[in-house]
Image: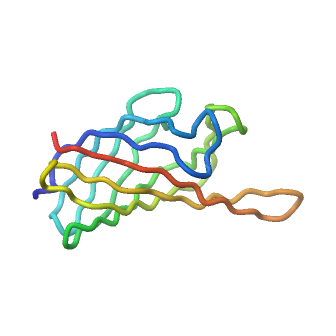
Amino acid sequence: MNLIGNWKGYYEFGEGYALPHFGERVVIEVSLSGSNHSFTGIMEEKESEFAVPLKSTIKGFSENGVLSIVKTYPKYPRIKEQGSSELVFENGILEIEHLGFVDEKFNSMYGGWSLREEFEVDGHIEEDILYGTWLLKKI
């Protein structure tokens, strides 16, 4: 299956997120270039309450139907406070790791994503690992 081209789908907030984020989906469009084995691309999120209003870059590879992708935002979007959908943008970039599979029968790719988030509590650094799922269909 040719991975190069345009894709449409979603990502979903999962374990580690509280309401109102948990279970919410964000519609995305992805354009990939390069080769099936090693590719780069751009991802845009459809404007919504839970979308990040930044273009992100994608870099990944595929081997025997297994995908490894890193999505990078040019700024670090952070949820302003628990129970809010409002974002604040901090200095630095945010990289999100995606693992998944190519499904030729359904002309799609899908999988899970995770990110490590550090924050300060009472003068020491804590870490959360946040998870979600994603699905893209070739258009």
Q: How is the image coloured?
A: rainbow
For the C terminus, the image quarter is top left
Q: In the image, what residue occupies the spot 10% across and 58% down?
A: 1
Q: Is residue 99 above or below residue 109?
A: below
List the single residue furthest toward the bottom: 63
Q: How many marks?
A: 0
State the residue in front, 67 or 30.
67
Whole-percent x, y for residue 87 in the image: 61, 36
List the single residue furthest toward the top: 48
**Res 25 quadrant in image:** top left
Q: Is residue 49 above or below residue 39?
A: above
| Relative side of 35 to 84, left or right | left
Whole-percent x, y for residue 102 in the image: 22, 59
Q: In the image, what residue occupies the spot 68% across and 60% down?
A: 118
| Relative side of 43 to 4, left or right | right
**Res 26 quadrant in image:** top left
Q: Is residue 25 above or below residue 67?
A: above
Q: In the image, what residue occupies the spot 22% across and 44% down?
A: 137
Whole-percent x, y for residue 63 in the image: 22, 72
| Relative side of 8 to 90, left or right | left
Whole-percent x, y for residue 126 in the image: 75, 62
**Res 121 quadrant in image:** bottom right
Q: In the image, what residue occupies the spot 58% across and 45% down?
A: 77
List the single residue furthest toward the right: 122
| Relative side of 69 to 50, left or right | left
State the residue in front, 47 or 113.
113
